[in-house]
Image (cartoon, coloured by chain):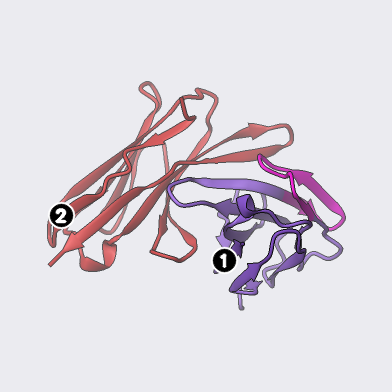
Amino acid sequence: NAGVTQTPKFRILKIGQSMTLQCAQDMNHNYMYWYRQDPGMGLKLIYYSVGAGITDKGEVPNGYNVSRSTTEDFPLRLELAAPSQTSVYFCASSGSSYNEQFFGPGTRLTVL
Amino acid sequence: RKEVEQDPGPFNVPEGATVAFNCTYSNSASQSFFWYRQDCRKEPKLLMSVYSSGNEDGRFTAQLNRASQYISLLIRDSKLSDSATYLCVVARSAGNNRKLIWGLGTSLAVNP
């Protein structure tokens, strides 16, 4: 099993550009999550999903959108990138909200 | 006041030392507790769950004190490979699901 995979590993965007961060898991987990982690700050939940077709906002959803058309994939969309979105983005999955979360390797995004 | 608080460190210890980290939480409705480990520029990974009676995994011991609302992690016989950031995570109910609250982490450097 590959576990949780994320692409790209690194990306530099200009202000106002858009992009999609990809996340996939092969563990048949229902729950998937997107976090951002800023230097010296804890993990902040952006969006999460409890199953295909169901998504919900986390603590810091503004500026992002998600979709969950399949169990495996949970892409995160940035529209109109801003410098404040410079961060490391982690995708995670779990079998339920009571199980361990498995994380992908992260995407390092810089917005200039 | 943050819902989950940790001493950021860094803790600098020699190989073979015993080191302990504490984490306090403010919400008495918190139900589950975890320690995750995050290596530099890597994703978080579950180190161990924390059970009410305390639990041990090799050189690692986790304790929970519900009355005082803190959890602890003890590392005995520290190895160079233990150098990492240790994240305290607290879970509580949020509607039909469970919400994880992440601490900012405690940095540990084990020196030769």
Indicate the position of residue A24 as horizontal and vertical percent values.
Answer: 70, 70
In the depicted structure, whether residue A80 falls above or below residue A45: below
- Residue A104, quarter of picture: bottom right
Residue at image mark 1:
A106
Callout 2: SS:
strand
Q: What residue type is labelled 2?
A: Val
Chain with red colouring: B
**Spatial separation of the CA atoms under disc 2 and disc 1:** 29 Å
Indicate the position of residue A33 as horizontal and vertical percent values.
Answer: 67, 54
* Quadrant placement of the C terminus of chain B: bottom left
Q: Give the range drawn in magenta.
A: A48-65
Which residue is at a point 68% across and 33% down the rendered structure image?
B94
Say whether residue B75 is left or right of residue A39. Answer: left
Indicate the position of residue A87 as horizontal and vertical percent values.
Answer: 56, 57
In this view, the residue in front, A24 or A38, is A38
Residue A13 within the magenta-colored segment of the rendering: no
In this view, the residue in front, B83 or A51, is B83
* Label 2 CA crowd tier, 10 Å (few <14, some 14–19, many 20+): some
Indicate the position of residue A18 as horizontal and vertical percent values.
Answer: 77, 63
Residues marked 2 and 1 touching at CB (< 8 Å): no
Chain designation of label 1: A
Residue A60 within the magenta-colored segment of the rendering: yes
Q: Can residue B64 be spotted in the picture?
A: no
Which residue is at a point 62% across and 39% down the rendered structure image?
B99
Which residue is at a point 59% across and 53% down the rendered structure image?
A36
Marking on residue B13 = 2
Chain with purple colouring: A
Callout 1: SS:
loop
Q: Which amino acid does label 1 sit on?
A: Gly
Q: Can residue B20 be spotted in the picture?
A: yes
Most extreme residue toward the bottom is A1
Say whether residue B1 is left or right of residue A88. Answer: left
